[in-house]
Image (cartoon, rainbow, N blue to C red):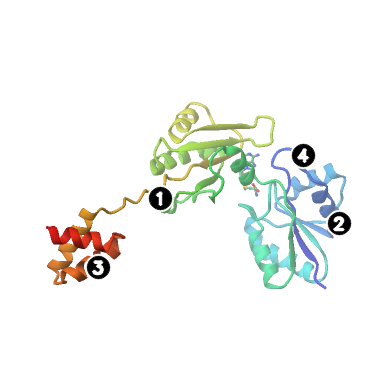
Amino acid sequence: MAGTLYLVPTPIGNLGDISPRMADTMAQADFIAAEDTRVSLKLLNHLGLKKPMISYYRHNTQAGGQAVLERLLAGESCALVTDAGTPAISDPGQELVALCAQHGVDVVAIPGPCALVTALAVSGQPTDRFTFEGFLPMNKKNRRTHLDSLKGEERTMVFYEAPHKLTATLEDLCQTFGAERPLSVCRELSKLHEEVRRTTLGEALTWYQANQPKGEFVLVVRGAEPVQEQEATLEDGLVRVEQLRAGGASLKDAVKQAARELSLSKNELYDLALDR
Ligand code: SAM
């Protein structure tokens, strides 16, 4: 019988966030697949565990994934860990989960630290509907196309960003959403210098142009204000009736169609049209 792939989240900055279940899962697994074996070795040492490890990182997802799959199909169980946070969330893992699903191998996700959820929860921005955007594309054209596609987005948007690219990204976000758009900059979550700045895109840009960004960042950007659809008036209805009549419709048919299109009362529109 095939083994199970366990997705094991690891702390995003505070070792106190290791849960008993995470530790047990790593202790029980036959082997660990790690994004960076040196980083994960430190965690294993902290937990007093010795485990066989293999590499599974962004640029070997095919060969690495195949190697993990073969061992799973042979009955071993595997704990997948990344450098920090939840595997498969802007981290290696999604291809391996898909591969396991294709081959009928069980996958169990252990709940735990994730910068996305931690930032969203503390941001103070609306959390009922949101979109996770991860890292923006680096290629200029793809980045612009991607940002343009978000122009009317009404849900809260969550972005990951590296410190050396933060000001360039804030500039692009300002250009796309305007300097007044509310933003929460969530920095160094769960670490000593944890900070949440609830500000605007313009103010954040000015701040980080003057103060070099340091640490890890999640940007939580408020969505666009919903566009209020104006209700049509009877006068709008009359204009539409005239257009339809000019196209050859009878008064009765024109009123019927205009009332339906603009959600107006057919009788009121008809009475008004007769008076004109
Ligand atoms: N899989 C991880 C997770 O579950 O959050 C994310 C990995 S992604 C490669 C790394 C990015 O996550 C960082 O560039 C930063 O945007 C965000 N991040 C990770 N740890 C963070 C922290 N402690 N505070 C703020 N952002 C963090």
Mark 2 beta carbon near ligand 1 (under 8 Å): no
Element carrying mark 4 = helix
Distance of mark 1 from mark 4, alpha carbons? 39 Å
Are dots 3 and 2 in contact, CB under 8 Å?
A: no
User: Residue type at mark 4?
Assistant: Leu
Q: Amino acid at mark 1?
A: Gly
Name which of mark 1 and mark 2 comes first in the sequence.
2
Residue at the spot of label 1: 152
Decide which of 227, 196 is in the foreground and name it.
227
Tag 2 residue:
28
Amino acid marked by disc 3:
Lys
CA–CA distance between discs 1 and 3?
34 Å
Label 4 packing within 10 angstroms: few (<14), some (14-19), many (20+): few
Asked if the residues shown at circle 1 and circle 4 are in contact, with their CB atoms under 8 angstroms apart, the answer is: no
Residue occupied by mark 3: 256
Q: CA distance from mark 4 to mark 2?
A: 20 Å
Relative vertical location of residue 42 with respect to residue 25 in this rendering, above or below: above
Quadrant of the rendering where the C terminus is positioned: bottom left
Q: Residue at x 76, y 59 (%)?
A: 6
Q: Which amino acid is tagged 2?
A: Gln
